[in-house]
DNA sequence: TTGAAAGCGCTAACAC
DNA sequence: GTGTTAGCGCTTTCAA
C-alpha cells in the first residue's frame, strides 16, 4: 500500500540534473545561482511527483529550530488554554509547530515530558506553570533544563519559579496589591483570602501582595486554603461561613467562581453582603452573575512573549539575560464587588 | 558557547567498542544480543557524556511515529481543550508528543497548518473540529489528507465531516434527540433552538436531531441563529425575547451560558419561566447558577479514541475502515430545566 | 552555472 | 558477541 516516497534523487533524475542542482533549485533559501530554465524544469518535476523534502534528512544536515514545546499543568484549565493560544499563535507566525504537554498537575508526568523533550532535542521549551517548592523536583527539573541548554536549546519560564531561567511572567504581586488596595479602598476591613496551592510560587507571590497591603492597612485577613479549582473555592467558603467577612480575595478565578457558587447556595448575596475578587481574568467572566471583578493577567500575551524570548535566545541575543521580564496586570472592576454596607457584616455572620 | 554534542561515535570510542555495539547496547528495542558487561560499560560512558541520540538521524534510518498532531478551532474553547487533554494523555501514554494547532476558526490558518504537518510528515493528524460545508475548502483539505495518507500517515476526524475519513465522533444527532425528547417530555410546546454555525456539520447534525423530535411531537420550534459562543447565545436570546417560548435548546454549552446570562439580564427566571439545555457538558457547569442541564459528550475520551484509532491505522490494522465510530452521549439533568408552569408562557412573553 | 563527492548521526545487514 | 560497511535523504564544499 505504502508506496516509496519520491526522494530528491528521483526528482533530479527525471529532471535530468544532478542532486545538487535539484537541491539548489528547490530550496528557496539557497543563495547559489541556478539557471531559471533549469529551476522551472526541476520545480515542474517536483510538483508532478508531489515531492516533499524529508525533514529528518534536512534537519540532520542543518539542524535548526522547528518546534517549540510548552508545558502546562492542565490544558483544560482556562488560564493555560489562553497561554497556549498565545504560544501557538506566535509560533505558527514564526513557522514553528507547538508541542503541548499537559502534565495533569503531576510532577512525575511533567518530568517524563521534559525528558522526552530533551531526548527529542526540542529547541525551545516553555514552562507555563509555576514551579514547585520541592528540592528534589527542582533538582531534577534543573538537570533537564541544563541539558536542554547544553544542546543549544532555550528554556523559558512563563510563571515564577525557583529555578533561575529567562522568564516572561505576570506581575502577580502587583496584581494582588491592586486587588487588595481596591478592596480596602472600598472600605472593607473584614476580609478573607482563599490561597492557592501552597507549594506553588504563583500562589505565594499573590499571597504576599495581599498581605503586604493588609498589613499596611492594619487589616487582619482570614486565610483559607484553596487549590486553584472551583471545588476548592467552594470548600473554602464553606469553611468561612459564619465568619464576619465582607470581602473575599481568591488567588485565581476558578477559585472565585467556586466561591461565588457556594455563597449563592448559602444565601449570601454578592456583592451586597460580601464582595468577591478573582485573579487572571479567564474568558467568560462577564457572562456569569455577578460578573466577576478580577485582576487581568495578559495570558495569551505572556505565551507569545515567551516564544519571542526563546527565539531571541536561540538567535544568540540576550543569552545571558536570565532575568524575568514582568508583564503588567490590571484590575478589572465588574459586579462582584461593592462597598460594605453598615449592617452587612452582621448579615454575613448570620449564615 | 554551544559545545559540540557527543555522538554515538564518541561513546563507542571512549567505551572501546564499535559503533554497532554501542548502538545495540544503548538501544532498548534492539533484539541483538550484547554482552552484559559491555552494555554496562557503554551505558556508563553514555551517561558520563550525557549522550542523547539524535532523533533526526535515528528517524532518517528507521522512520516511525513520534508525534501526533491535533487541529482544533480554538484551544481556548473548553470543548477543544478537553479533547486535547484526551489526546495528549493517550499520546504521552504511547510515548508520543502532541502537536496542537489552534486555527482560530480561520480556514486559511487551518490549511496552512495542515500543509506544515504534511511537510513535516507527521504520522498522525487528528481533526478535532467539524468540517466546513465549502467545496473549495473540502477540496484543499482532502488534497492534503490524501498526501498524508500517501506518505503512510493516518488522518482521523473527531467531529463530523464531509470528507470520508476514519472517525471517532460524538453521537450528535442522538444527543439532540435526547435533549429534545426530554424537553417535550417535560411538557414544553413553545420551544426555541439556538443554532450553531450553519456551515459546520456538527451544528447540522444537532439541529437535525432536535427537528426530528419536534416534528414527531408536532411542535413548531423557533429557530434562532448562533455561533457557538456566549456572545452568540446572548444575541439569540435578545432576538427571542417577547416570544412565548418556555424552553431553549442551545447547540452547545457556551451558547447556553450566554443565553442564561441574557435571560437573567432580562429578568426572565430560569428554569421557572424558561428552561435552558446546553450541549457538550464542558467542565464547570455545576458551578454556575442555575447548573446547566446538558448533553454530555465524552470529549477527552473522543480525543483518546482518536489517538488509538490513528495508531491502529499506522499499525496496518483497520486501514480500510473508513467508517465513523460513534461515541455515545447522555443527557445530564441539572437545574436549568423544569416543567412549564401554567402561567409561564405569558410571563416569558411579557418581557 | 553545474556536478561529484563527502558527510550529518544512526541502524542493520552481513561477516567474523 | 562484536566489528565492518553500506546507506537513510539531504546540503554543501570543491572542482570544473
Image (cartoon, coloured by chain):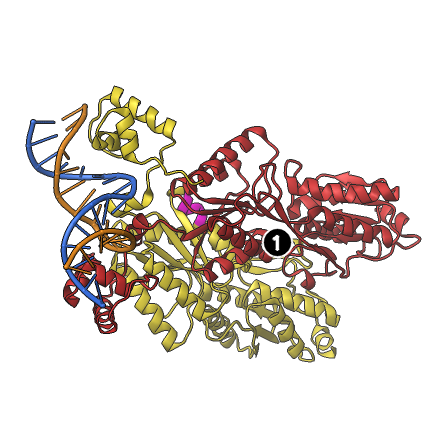
Chain colours: A yellow, B red, C orange, D blue
- Residue B264 in percent (x, y) is at 75, 54
Residue at label 1?
A284
- Residue A330 in percent (x, y) is at 50, 57
Query: How many callouts does the rendering have?
Result: 1
Q: Judge by depth and name the residue closer to the eye, A90 or B205.
A: B205
Specify whether B10 is left or right of B158.
left
Relative vertical location of residue A131 with respect to residue B241 in this rendering, above or below: below
Relative vertical location of residue A40 with respect to residue A346 in this rendering, above or below: above
Q: Residue at x 45, y 36 (%)?
A: B147
Q: Residue at x 51, y 52 (%)?
A: B312
Specify whether B53 is left or right of A77.
left
Q: Chain of mark 1?
A: A
- Residue A4 in percent (x, y) is at 37, 38
Q: Residue at x 37, y 61 (%)?
A: A116
Q: Is residue A89 magenta?
A: yes
Q: Judge by depth and name the residue closer to the eye, A28 or B45.
A: B45
Q: Quadrant of the C terminus of chain A?
A: bottom right
- Residue A178 in percent (x, y) is at 51, 64
Furthest residue in direction right, as rendered: B342
- Tell me the magenta residue range: A88-92
Amino acid at each position: 500500500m505504502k508506496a516509496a516516497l519520491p526522494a530528491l534523487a528521483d526528482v533530479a533524475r527525471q529532471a535530468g540534473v544532478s542532486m545538487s542542482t535539484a537541491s539548489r533549485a528547490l530550496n528557496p533559501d539557497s543563495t547559489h545561482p541556478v539557471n531559471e530554465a533549469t529551476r522551472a524544469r526541476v520545480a515542474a518535476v517536483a510538483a508532478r511527483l508531489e515531492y516533499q523534502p524529508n525533514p529528518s534528512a534536512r534537519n540532520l544536515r542543518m539542524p535548526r529550530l522547528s518546534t517549540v514545546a510548552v508545558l502546562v499543568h492542565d490544558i483544560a484549565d482556562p488560564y493555560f488554554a489562553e497561554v497556549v493560544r498565545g504560544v501557538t499563535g506566535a509560533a505558527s507566525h514564526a513557522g514553528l509547530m507547538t508541542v503541548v504537554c499537559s502534565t495533569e498537575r503531576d510532577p512525575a508526568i511533567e518530568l517524563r515530558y521534559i525528558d522526552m523533550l530533551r531526548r527529542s532535542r526540542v529547541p525551545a521549551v516553555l514552562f507555563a506553570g509555576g514551579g514547585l517548592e520541592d528540592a528534589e523536583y527542582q533538582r531534577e527539573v534543573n538537570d533537564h533544563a541544563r541539558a536542554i541548554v547544553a544542546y543549544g536549546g532555550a528554556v523559558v519560564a512563563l510563571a515564577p519559579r525557583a529555578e533561575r531561567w529567562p522568564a516572561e511572567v505576570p506581575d502577580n504581586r502587583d496584581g494582588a496589591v491592586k486587588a487588595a488596595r481596591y478592596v480596602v479602598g472600598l472600605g472593607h476591613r473584614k476580609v478573607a483570602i482563599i490561597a492557592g496551592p501552597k507549594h506553588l510560587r504563583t500562589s505565594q507571590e499573590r499571597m504576599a501582595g495581599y498581605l503586604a497591603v493588609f498589613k499596611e492597612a492594619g487589616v487582619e485577613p482570614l486565610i483559607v486554603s484553596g487549590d486553584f479549582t472551583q471545588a476548592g473555592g467552594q470548600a473554602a467558603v464553606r469553611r468561612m461561613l459564619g465568619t464576619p467577612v465582607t470581602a473575599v480575595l481568591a488567588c485565581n478565578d476558578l477559585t472565585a467562581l467556586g466561591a461565588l457558587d457556594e455563597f449563592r447556595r448559602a444565601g449570601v448575596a454578592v456583592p451586597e453582603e460580601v464582595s468577591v475578587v478573582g485573579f487572571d481574568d479567564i474568558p467568560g467572566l462577564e457572562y456569569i452573575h455577578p460578573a466577576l471583578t478580577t485582576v487581568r493577567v495578559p495570558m495569551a500575551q505572556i505565551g507569545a512573549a515567551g516564544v519571542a524570548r526563546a527565539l531571541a535566545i536561540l538567535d544568540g541575543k540576550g543569552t545571558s539575560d536570565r532575568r524575568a521580564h514582568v508583564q503588567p496586570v490590571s484590575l478589572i472592576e465588574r459586579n462582584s464587588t461593592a462597598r460594605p454596607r453598615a449592617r452587612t457584616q452582621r448579615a454575613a455572620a448570620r449564615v
